[in-house]
Image (spheres, rainbow, N blue to C red):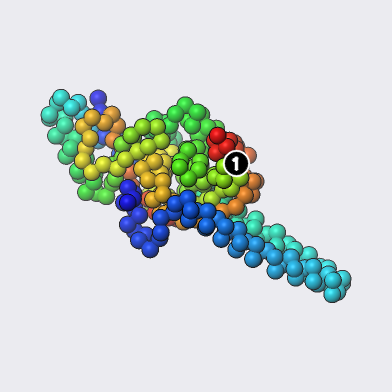
Amino acid sequence: MARLVRMDRTGHTTLAEWDAADPVAVDAAVRAFREELDRGYFAMVSTGPGHAEQVKELPLDADLVVLRLPISGG
Amino acid sequence: MTALPEVAAVPWRPPMDALRLRWRGRLWTLTTFAHVVPFLAAGVLLLWVQPLAAPVALASFAHAWVIPMLYAARGANVLRPKGRSGAAAEATALGLLGDLLDHDARELRAATGLVVERGRLGVWVIGEAGAALVSGGRGQRITCFCVRVDHPELPSADRTAHLLLALRADEVGFATVANMAFSGARWRVARRLKREARPALAAAAALDRV
């Protein structure tokens, strides 16, 4: 089961879980994904050891999509 | 072409690639040298002209010693732990960070509070409020960057995970967005970290030698 999680003050919150074969779960996940992007989150997926990629569409084949906030120089 | 959207917020900064990183490191060393040498020279001159001015000369030597120390302390600050959230939030965040790390990195994070991650520019040591790049081929140089997610309520492991994911997406972009806080000898920063955090720098140096 793939997961969409948002890093937040609780540690993280699972916003959606889906199976690519389940169109209802996929729709809900895509909706949740877009809402979070509209709120300013960036979506990241791991693409191998030591590598990650920012995505703008929900990758249905990913195991885990993590939503993060922007970073800046301190 | 950068993959990190935050780079758009600092359009005046050139990409912090390996060449620029080396140049900035040398410039930092030169600046430190320019701060220290006049105090050393003034102290020596005072002693030579008037030995009775030894206390003033000693004060001048103290300045020459303190200035690099303060710079290194500023660098070490980026790796120091910050405030903690509630235990439940910290544990949840730690679980997610652990999922992003391999076994060795996870164990090192548990022991030191820092994540060690190999990149193309060197080996990164990532904390909650910044990251340090250990480089030079023998791990002798460290460049400290102040960079963070602007959300103080996040658990510490989440703050580290934010930086780790951004770094993995675009290393040069990550270094470009970050503010350089120190560049110099690794031992200078290591001395100013808590004892339990130092193995992370040693591990990064060992990885840099491989």
Give the side of residue B206 with respect to residue B120, left or right.
Answer: right
Question: Does the image show residue B167?
Answer: yes
Q: Which residue is mark 1?
A: B138
Q: Residue at x 40, y 60 (%)?
A: B13
In the image, residue B202 sits, relative to residue A20, either above or below, namely below
Q: Residue B147, image x and y in percent?
A: 44, 51
Indicate the quadrant where residue B155 lies.
Answer: top left
Number of numbered discs on residues: 1
Q: Residues within 10 Å of mark 1 (few under 14, many from 20)?
A: some
Going by the numbered disc 1, the residue's amino acid type is Arg
Q: Nearer the viewer, residue B19 or B122?
A: B19
Secondary element type, mark 1: loop
Q: Is residue A54 left or right of residue B196?
A: left
Quarter of the view holding residue B177: bottom left
Residue A39: image location, x then y, percent: 24, 49
Left or right placement of residue B37 versus residue B90 in this view: right
Q: Is A11 located above or below residue B23 in the figure? A: above
Residue B130 position in % (x across, y down) = 47, 48
Which residue is pictured at 83% across the width and 69% down the height?
Answer: B47
Does residue B109 lie above or below B136 as drawn? above
Residue B154 in view, yes or no: no
Q: Splitting the image into 4 quarters, where does residue A10 fall? A: top left
Residue ID at (32%, 40%): A53
Q: Position of residue B50 (x, y in %)?
A: 86, 74
Residue, far bottom: B49
Task: Look at 27% across and 50% down and name the residue there.
Answer: A40
The single residue placed furthest to the front in the displayed view is: B19
| Circle 1 chain | B
